[in-house]
């Protein structure tokens, strides 16, 4: 017997709703940078760990995806991830020491990573024909959650205070957990096949690096765009609104990818187009930060918002079965998130050293050029390096 899930349309709605929960813990940090520094005594490097640690845990948790699928199944694994995320977020409403912020970052990142590892495999196994569309919707939900959190971070802080503002996403995660448990039925788990994925190591590494650098752009902007503009004299609320505009653009880009993906059996033109937009947005932060912030946000949002689901979809394109998809996604996301975790930390070191964050934007720009070279190798139906 197999785990039973809902019909595709209702499942798509629930998957989107689950996605909404996977970024508030990270997105709320940037707009509240000055308050967290003051109340929790964080340096720029310590502050960057509030993004780096969850992202690193996403990578480590993703690597356990095949083991979780084999031992407890996708449905129960996603429920466990939501429970872990709920506990981590609510814990921040109880205590706010630097050490406990770091512990909740680790716990929340583990929960997020488990969900992100298991949801794509579940989608591929149950809805193979609609996998690309469902993946794009799930990814778009992730970015929508970041947008809502970025826009509401400073208003929630002004209304409720710091600890309730940090903990409120735990209530949403709890509601989502209850919906998941009541909407998805379980039965006996399919025994996992003993064979492993046969994709060449070189191609797996390329997919991992591609996902890691692309996600690094997302984590860097998510953590450091608001502090960058606060340093330029913006208020915390307005910097949060700018990040919200950027993430709303990501949502729109994600929906566009969902609607147009079928027209691009060769993903390379789409990949190269969004990478050009991302590179232009990063360079505009370096050379025109004050004169064109909204255009920079739109360029970054479009590039990042399309690149994130495309990275997962390109990975799924290389899988020939649900089991291979689970193994491949766990490797690509696991190693990729560990790579992505470095970018916010690098920016924190840059900030503590007294240098401008422009150096971090330039480093990321160089990474995007590398992505362009890798993307050209992703020929359709090609699993050979």
Image: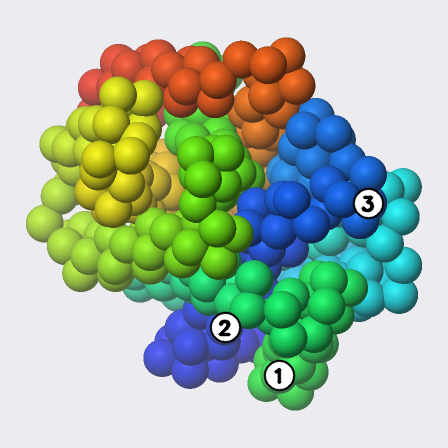
Question: Label for residue 17?
Answer: 2
Q: Earlier in the sequence, mark 1 or mark 2?
A: 2
Decide which of 203, 50 is in the foreground and name it: 50
Residue at the bottom extreme? Answer: 182
- Where is residue 193 shown, x and y percent of the image? 63, 45
> Would you name the residue on which mark 3 appears?
40
Residue positioned 19% across, 51% down in the render: 261
Per the image, label 3 sits on a secondary structure element best described as: helix
Residue positioned 80% across, 49% down in the render: 39
- Kindly report the distance in space between the C-alpha atoms of the residues bearing marks 1 and 3: 34 Å
Question: Image check: 341 left or right of 148?
Answer: right
- Kindly report the distance in space between the C-alpha atoms of the residues bearing marks 1 and 2: 10 Å
Q: Is residue 32 visible?
A: yes
- Where is residue 281 shown, x and y percent of the image? 26, 32
Classify mark 2: residues with Cα within 10 Å, few (<14), some (14-19) or many (20+).
many
Per the image, label 1 sits on a secondary structure element best described as: helix
Q: Earlier in the sequence, mark 3 or mark 2?
A: 2
């Amino acid at each position: 017997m197999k785990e039973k899930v809902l019909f595709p349309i209702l499942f798509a709605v629930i998957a989107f709703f689950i996605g909404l929960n996977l970024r508030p813990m990270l997105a709320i940090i940037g707009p509240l940078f000055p308050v967290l520094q003051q109340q929790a005594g964080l340096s720029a490097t310590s502050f960057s760990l509030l993004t780096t640690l969850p992202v690193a845990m996403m990578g480590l948790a993703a690597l356990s995806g095949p083991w979780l699928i084999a031992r407890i199944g996708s449905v129960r694994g996603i429920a466990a991830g939501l429970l872990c995320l709920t506990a981590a977020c609510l814990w921040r409403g109880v205590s706010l020491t630097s050490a406990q912020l770091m512990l909740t970052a680790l716990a929340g990142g583990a929960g997020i990573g488990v969900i992100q590892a298991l949801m794509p495999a579940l989608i591929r196994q149950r809805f193979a024909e609609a996998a690309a569309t469902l993946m794009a919707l799930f990814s778009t939900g992730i970015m929508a959650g970041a947008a809502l959190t970025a826009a509401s971070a400073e208003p929630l802080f002004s209304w409720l205070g710091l600890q309730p503002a940090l903990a409120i996403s735990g209530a949403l995660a709890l509601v989502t957990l209850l919906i998941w448990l009541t909407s998805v039925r379980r039965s006996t788990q399919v025994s996992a096949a003993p064979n492993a994925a046969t994709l060449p190591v070189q191609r797996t590494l390329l997919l991992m690096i591609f996902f890691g650098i692309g996600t690094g752009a997302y984590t860097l902007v998510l953590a450091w765009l608001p502090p960058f503009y606060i340093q330029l004299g913006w208020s915390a609320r307005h910097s949060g609104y700018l990040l919200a505009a950027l993430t709303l653009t990501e949502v729109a880009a994600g929906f566009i990818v969902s609607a147009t993906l079928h027209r691009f059996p060769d993903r390379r033109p789409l990949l190269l187009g969004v990478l050009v937009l991302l590179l232009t947005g990063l360079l505009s932060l370096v050379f025109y930060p004050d004169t064109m912030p909204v255009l920079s946000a739109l360029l970054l949002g479009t590039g990042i918002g399309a690149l994130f689901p495309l990275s997962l979809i390109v990975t799924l394109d290389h899988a020939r079965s649900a089991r291979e998809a689970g193994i491949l996604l766990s490797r690509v996301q696991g190693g990729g998130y560990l790579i992505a975790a470095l970018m916010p930390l690098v920016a924190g070191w840059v900030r503590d050293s007294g240098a401008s964050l422009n150096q971090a934007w330039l480093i990321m720009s160089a990474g995007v050029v590398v992505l362009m070279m890798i993307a050209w190798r992703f020929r359709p139906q090609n699993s050979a390096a």
